[in-house]
Image (cartoon, rainbow, N blue to C red):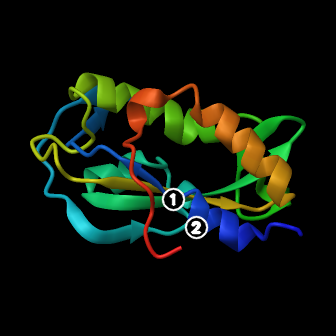
Amino acid sequence: MKLRSTLLLRLMMIAMVGAGVGWNNDVVAQITVVPLPHAHAHNDYYHQRPLRDALELGFTSVEADVFLVDGELLVGHDRWELRPQRTLESLYLEPLAEIVAENNGSVFAPHPGQVFWLHIDVKSAARETFEAIQKRLLKYPTLFQAKQATGL
C-alpha cells in the first residue's frame, strides 16, 4: 500500500517547544513577541526571510513544502523553484535549533509554554522523502517534545 503525501504531512506535524525571538542581521536576539496561537504562515518559504518573518510576527505555525532531490531536502512549492541552498535544514531546522539554544529550550520567550508547529508538506515520493525527513530530524533532538499530533 502506498503512503499518500497528505497522510505524511499530517504525520509530520511537529510540536516544538515555544519562546520570543528576533533577528538583527541574522543574529538571534531575544525580543518580546506575543505568540498568536492560531496564526499559520502558509508557504512560509516565500517570505523574504523564511521562518524569521513569521516568528517576529508571533506566528506559532509555519509550513515548508519539501522535495527530496539527490539526498537533499529542498524547500519549494514546485520543482522549478528548488535551489540547492534552500534546504529544510538551512531555512528551518538550523535556525530553530539556534533559537531554542539561545532561549533555554524555547522558541517564544517569555512564553516558554507556547507550542510551535513546523508543518512539513511532502512533495516528492512519499516513502523516500518521509524517511529522509526522519533521518534529518534525528540531528535535532532538542527541538522536539514527545507529543503525538492529534486528529490523525
**Which disc is residue 147 wearing?**
none
Above or below residue 61? Residue 38 is below
Dot 2 and dot 1 residues touching (CB under 8 Å): yes
Residue located farthest toward the front when viewing the structure as drawn:
1
Above or below residue 79? Residue 144 is above
- Left or right of 25? Residue 90 is right
Q: Position of residue 137 (x, y in %)?
A: 58, 35
Front position in the image: 83 or 122: 122
Q: Position of residue 136 (x, y in %)?
A: 65, 33
Which residue position holds label 2? 10
Amino acid type at circle 1 is Met
Figure quadrant of the N terminus: bottom right
Residue 72 shows in this picture: yes
Q: Position of residue 145 (x, y in %)?
A: 37, 42
Is disc 1 placed on a helix, strand or loop? loop
Q: Quadrant of residue 62?
A: bottom left
- Left or right of 123? Residue 12 is left
Front position in the image: 6 or 38: 6
Residue 87 shows in this picture: no
The count of marks equals 2
Amino acid type at circle 2 is Arg
Which residue position holds label 1? 13
Figure quadrant of the C terminus: bottom right
Front position in the image: 142 or 28: 142
* Residue visible at 9% across and 42% down in the picture: 110
* Residue visible at 27% across and 50% down in the picture: 56
Mark 1 Cα-neighbour bin, 10 Å: few <14, some 14–19, many ≥20: some
* Residue visible at 90% across and 36% down in the picture: 70
Above or below residue 56? Residue 60 is below
Is disc 2 placed on a helix, strand or loop? helix
Q: Position of residue 92 (x, y in %)?
A: 51, 41
